[in-house]
Image (spheres, rainbow, N blue to C red):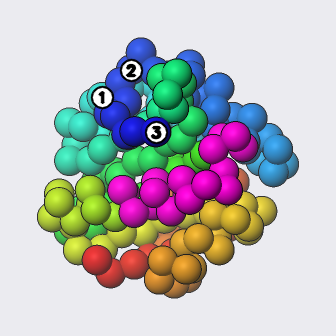
Amino acid sequence: MRFRNANNADRKSIEGLIFPILESYGLKPSPESTDSDLADIESIYFQNGGIFDVLVNEENEIVGTVAVHRTEDELCELRKMYLSKTARGHGNGKRLFSHAIDEARKLGYKRIWLETADALVEAKNLYTAFGFSPFEGPHQSPRCDLSMVLDL
């Protein structure tokens, strides 16, 4: 498995990975709002001081996604961290997370925050294991009920 930059041509494959995962946890995809960033990955992420990378398998299929989005000069948001069921249980969640943290540091960010839903138990446990702590942040997404932050 390897990482590569996502591009706008990946949109359907990325939605095909993310949306069923959300639905499996009882969360509703929202391409008009929370997930509208997938409509133009290149400008929303790369042209704004962030990244959007995908993890691909040997067949070049997208099995994971992770993004870092610029919020302020030294603050970024972890977004779109998802992993297919077939890629889970092999340390790939930790790989996605470590990759995002490393990229955020390379980009000069000092702090990273995220929003998640309590329903995403595995993700929440991973964030906590990596040192994220809850904070009273903005809940920009209606499907999220928890904000977490990590000083880099």
Q: Is residue 96 magenta?
A: yes
The residue nearer to you, when weighing 23 against 6, is 6
Cα distance between the residues tagged 3 and 1: 22 Å
- Give the answer, above or below, for where 64 lies relative to 15: below
Prevalent SS, magenta region: helix
In terms of image quadrants, where is residue 107?
A: bottom left
**Disc 2 secondary structure class:** helix
Which comes sooner in the sequence, label 1 or label 2?
2
Q: Is residue 33 visible?
A: no
Query: Rounded to the nearest whole Å, what is the CA distance between mark 3 and mark 2?
Result: 21 Å
Earlier residue among tags 3 and 1? 3
Q: Can the viewer see residue 138?
A: yes
The answer to the question of whether label 3 and label 1 lie on touching residues, with beta carbons closer than 8 A, is: no
User: Disc number at residue 8?
Assistant: 2
Q: For mark 2, does the 10 Å Cα neighbourhood hold few (<14), some (14 to 19), or many (20 or more) residues?
A: few
- Work out which quarter of the rendered image holds the C terminus and state it: bottom left
Q: Quadrant of residue 42?
A: top left
107 relative to 37, above or below:
below
The residue under the point 59% across, 70% down is 126
Q: Type of residue at label 2?
A: Asn
What residue is rendered at 64% in x and 70% in y? 124
Which tag, 3 or 2, sits closer to the chain's start? 3
Residue behind mark 1: 42
Residue sitting at x 70%, y 65%: 122
Q: Nearer the viewer, mark 3 or mark 1?
A: 3
Q: Which residues are magenta?
A: 84-100
| Disc number for residue 1 | 3
Q: Alpha carbon of mark 1 to alpha carbon of mark 2: how far?
A: 6 Å
Residue type of the residue flagged with mark 3: Met
Query: Percent from the top left, x then y, of residue 96?
Result: 46, 54
Relative height, residue 139 to residue 14 (above, below) = below
Asked if residue 24 is among those painted magenta in the image, a careful observer would answer no
